[in-house]
Image (cartoon, rainbow, N blue to C red):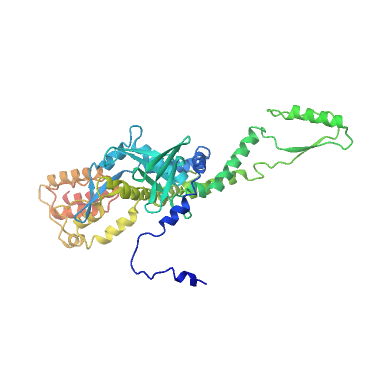
Amino acid sequence: MFNWLRNRFTGRRTLRPVPHLRLMAQHATPAYPDLSQTAAQAGVYTQSPWVYVAVSRIAESAALVPLHVYRTVEGKRVRADDHPLEQLLDHPNPHMSRFDLIEQTVGTLELTGNAYWFLAGEGGTPTEIWPLRPDRVAVVPDGNSYVRGYVYTVDGMEMPLEAVEVIHFRRWHPLNDYYGLSALQAASNAVHTDKAMATWNRNTFGTDNGVPAGIVTLPDTITDADYERIKREWKASYGGTQRRTAFLRGSSVTWQSIAHSQTDLDYQRGREANRDEILNIFGVPVGMVSDNTTEANAKVAERTFIERTLYPKLVRLQAVMTAELLPFWERGAVAAFDDIRPTDRRMQIDEMQAALPVMSVNEVRARYYSLPPVRWGEVSTEAIKSAPVPVPADDHSAVLDELRAWEKFTLRRLGREDVRPFTVEQVPDADAVEISARLVTADDADAIKAVFRAVRERYT
């Protein structure tokens, strides 16, 4: 069946340039994107409350996360202070802030699956970043370089943009080589259903004043003149913009409702089902917006949102900036947002407690807290347990004063990332080792106070 294909294979055993780019470019050229559909997707943001909630929550949360540039020095990742990329992102153009830029970029990615930055400047590096509306941007495919450039269209006027001038962020689309798939497109059925239900509810109480539709039944023997008169009287009394009681002349006139009420249609649960589906597609847990959520469920929802929704989106942005924006200044550097994923504190404490018998205090400080070594920190907790308890001197007021100062120092820095250790001068090394070892697992004020109270009892 496939004998005709055999002659088309050469048996090559070496690599070659990408052979299918030209086919992709030829396939995409006549399929100019429907930018009106992209505009409609963006317009849903102004009409659907749940789309607005989901996109706003994602975009605003992403805009709050700091981004830094790192270099590799002697095998270690070192932060580059005040890098030109960070400066540019802080002031992308005269009319936008960093928050505005990231919020708009992430928001358009969620709504349309694509986001574009135009890089402006004179010379070799960009000095301004301008976000472009996706409903105005079309990709120009190329058989050799994949993308030849972009076309920006406003009111029928087309402006060509070179590929080097534009950074294209896009979500993965399984059926398109050049454009991304938006979460909104996947949620379109739920969005349209919810909008239809909201419109029906508005019309019921706005246009129809809550009056259900029905059928007026007249007797068969009525004359045409009476039929027309009753219709006029019914519409005049019951068809206005206010709820009224109809008074009709004639006998045997009956009315039968043919409409379904909100209760009959399970309206409220239907809207909630649409809400849940829309939020789930966007990756926003319902527990973050529901009034009935407990505090515990809200914390779980927030953690799930950060780990499974927000952080992967930030990784997508930083990967594109590293590949396409950072090379304007240097190669080999990496742009990275802060790792905002919450850690399991209880698990970390258990791991540290298991490591303390075989690791020195300084090793624990460096591994779990990124803290510098201390003079007394080269001893493990096992050595502390086996060492004799020191006998305090007769005058130990200086030791007690230093213990109180150390306790206040530690309590003030609870929850902060402070790399400066407390300077110990009076407390004996054995006690200093014990305090430091126990402090690495003390995660609240009560635990810290208990550490120092146990040591002070030896001197009182």
**In the image: residue 107, left or right of residue 218:** left
Q: Where's residue 169, x and y in %?
A: 39, 47
Please determine whether, in this image, residue 368 is positioned above or below residue 115: below
Image quadrant in which you'd find residue 408: top left
Q: In the displayed orientation, state which residue is furthest to the left.
A: 394
Quadrant in the picture for residue 245: top right
- Look at the picture and state if 75 lies above or below 245: below
Residue nearer the viewer, 122 or 45: 122
Depth check: 452 or 349 in front? 349
Judging depth in this view, the residue of 416 and 117 nearest the camera is 117
Q: Along the horizontal axis of the image, is 393 left or right of 301? A: left
Q: Quadrant of residue 119?
A: top left
Residue 107 picture location, percent across and down: 43, 42
The residue located at (89%, 36%) in the rendering is 221
Q: Position of residue 160 (x, y in %)?
A: 40, 41
Q: Position of residue 177 (x, y in %)?
A: 44, 53
